[in-house]
Each structure stands twice: as structure tokens, then as C-alpha cells.
Image (cartoon, helix red, strand yellow):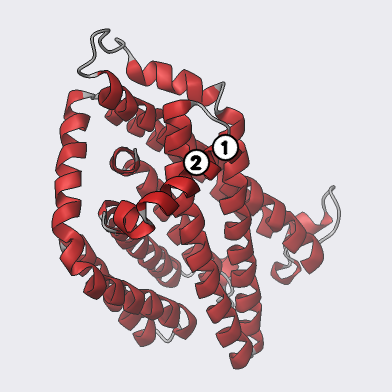
Amino acid sequence: TTGIIVNIVMGLGTAIAYFVMHYYSAAVVFLVFTCISAFCYWGMRSRIPFSAEVLVTVIDVMKSYKSTLVVSAIGLLVSGIFSLLFSAVVVATYMKYDPKQGSEGCSVSGGGCSNAKLIGILFFVFFAGYYITEVIRNVIHVTISGVYGTWYYLSRSDEGQPRWPASGAFKRAMTYSFGSICFGSLIVTFIDLLKQGLNLLRQNAAAAGETCAQCGYLVLDILLGIIEWLARFFNQYAYSYIALYGDGYISAAKATWHLMRQKGIDALCNECLVGTALGFYAMFNAYVCALLAFLYVRLTKPEYNSEGTFYAPVVAFSFVIALQISNIVTQPLRSGTST
């Protein structure tokens, strides 16, 4: 409850701050997210006690298996390093191929500058960045799900538990299950890429002063956000199935869908709000990072942003990177709940 309320307050405060600073496009986006969060909280209040009981069980298991925290810490380190590399590549791409900046990079070897080259290379960079990030996150998820599976099946068995359950689960994730992890990660990656393409189009529409086009792109962005949530939601359980039984992605997806149809999606998943609450905390962190990034660019007034064209990319990149890292930090709780 606290996480949801804090997230709503922070989202509303961020939207108001953007309105005060006359950055209306970001203000509208954050205001819409806040309204959706408030609506979700109003409908899920009665389901919180069950989720609290599940969370207590997950935390108890985590205390018994400290390796889940080690896996999460390593994943955080790897994702943080990759985020720095991803940010540097995005900045370098703008410096080399953006014709509006008049950069000296346009005259060096590797071709001239143009909007077509800039968009094409950014498309590839974002695809690779999102894809690798999804693979890292799903490897962590499958590894931790394997640890929880060890607890569930072997904690009270006659043969006992393996000495290093996290090590065995990681080996399976990086060998037998790695192809399934890579394949399933493509689905969410394509959706993320479409969302980022919409953000670029919305940015161009804002620069051209096309209000109707901005509203249309905003609606499409919300619809893609819902589709992305459904894909991540389904993949979360499919990957737990892969960790438990070692099946391929297609087989695990079919088994997961059969399980949801048999037990009921509402009874199986929607009654448990642990993942939703953790998502709110991750979004809260993303709100703060995006706002601080915007204030940094606004107060330092760097030369590359003399025309204000870099506000939207900086805010968007900061939001996405902070959200991904926050999701990786809370992955042990998500994986335990799903498993």
C-alpha cells in the first residue's frame, strides 16, 4: 500500500513540476501514468492481504537461500555496466550522425550525417540494448526461479538439497535454457522498440507543433504499454516453468497458458499483487531519476542542448535505464512469487 501511494504522489508531483517548467509533453505522460496507478490501486485494495502472505513466504525462503541476493547483486552490477555502455553509444550516435548539431563528427570517416542514418542506427542501438537487457534480466529470473524450485521440491525430500542450488540453476539457464531465454526475450524487445520509435515520432511532432499527432502517438504509446505489460506478465510465469522443468519456450508457453485457463487467471495471478507493488517502486525510482536528469540538463545548460532538443531523449533514457535496473534489483522477490 505504501509503495502504491508513494508512487502516485511522486508521479503527480513530477507531472506538476513539468507543468510549472512548461514541459507539457512529459507532464501529460506522467499525469496519465499517475491516473492509471490510482485507478489500479482503487481496484486492488481488497487483494492486498493475500499478497502480503505470499510476500512473507518468499522473504522467508530468501533468508534461507542467501544466494538469491548474490545473484541479484551480480545482475545489478552487470546491468549497471551495460547501461553505461548503452548510454555512451546513444550519445556517440547523436554526436556522429545528427545533422542538426553541426558536429565535426559529420566530416570524419564513416559517412556523412542525415536524419535517415541517425534513425536507422538508433533503431539498431535500441534493439540491441533492449534485447541484451531483457536477456540479462531473464537469466537472473530463471536462475532464482531454479533456487525456489529447489526449496519447493527438495527442502523436505529424502535425498536432500544440492549444496549450491544457485550455481546449478545458473548453469542450466546459460546452457540448456539459454536459447529459450533469448527467444522469449525477443517478444518484449520488439514491443519496447516500437514504443521507443513512437517516442521519437512524438518528439518530432512536438518540434513541428503538431498537437493532434502528439495526442495520437500518446494513445498508441499507452496501448503498447498495456501490450508490453501482458507480454512481460506471461513471460514471467513461462520462464519459471522453464526453470522448474527445463522445457523449451514454446512448450513452456503452452503449459503456462493451459495452467492459467485451468486455474483461472484471476485466481492464479491477479490476486497476488507482489509484482505490481514492486513495479510501483521501480516506477517511483524511474520518476526520480528522470526528473533529476531533466533538472541537470536544464540547470547546467550544456551547449549540445542550446535549442532544447535533448530534453526528451535524456528524460526517456534516464527513465528506461532506471526502470530496468530497479526491476533487476527486485527480481528475487518477483521470481520467488511467480515460481
Residue sticking out furthest to the top: 159
Q: Tell me where residue 217 appears, x and y as whole percent.
A: 59, 79
User: Pointer 2: what residue?
Assistant: 255
Quarter of the image for residue 131 reads top right
Q: Is mark 1 on a helix, strand or loop?
A: helix
Q: In this view, does 127 lie to the left or right of 113?
A: left
Q: Look at label 2 and name its amino acid.
A: Ala
Which mark, by number, is residue 21? Answer: none
Please name whichever residue, 52 or 194, is drawn nearer the observer in this view of the structure.
52
Q: In this view, does 88 lie to the left or right of 44?
A: right
Q: Is mark 2 on a helix, strand or loop?
A: helix
Spatial CA distance of label 2 from label 1 is 6 Å
Q: Which residue is drawn at 52% across and 38% down?
A: 252
Q: Tell me where residue 325 appears, x and y as whole percent.
A: 40, 47
Q: Look at label 1 and name its amino acid.
A: Ser
Q: Residue at x 22, y 31 (%)?
A: 62
Q: Can residue 78 be seen in this view?
A: no
Label 2 close to label 1 by CB (< 8 Å): yes
Q: Is residue 217 above or below residue 297?
A: below
User: Pointer 1: what residue?
Assistant: 251
Please name whichever residue, 12 or 268, is drawn nearer the observer in this view of the structure.
268
The quarter of the image holding the C terminus is top left
How many numbered marks, from 0 up? 2
The quarter of the image holding the N terminus is bottom left
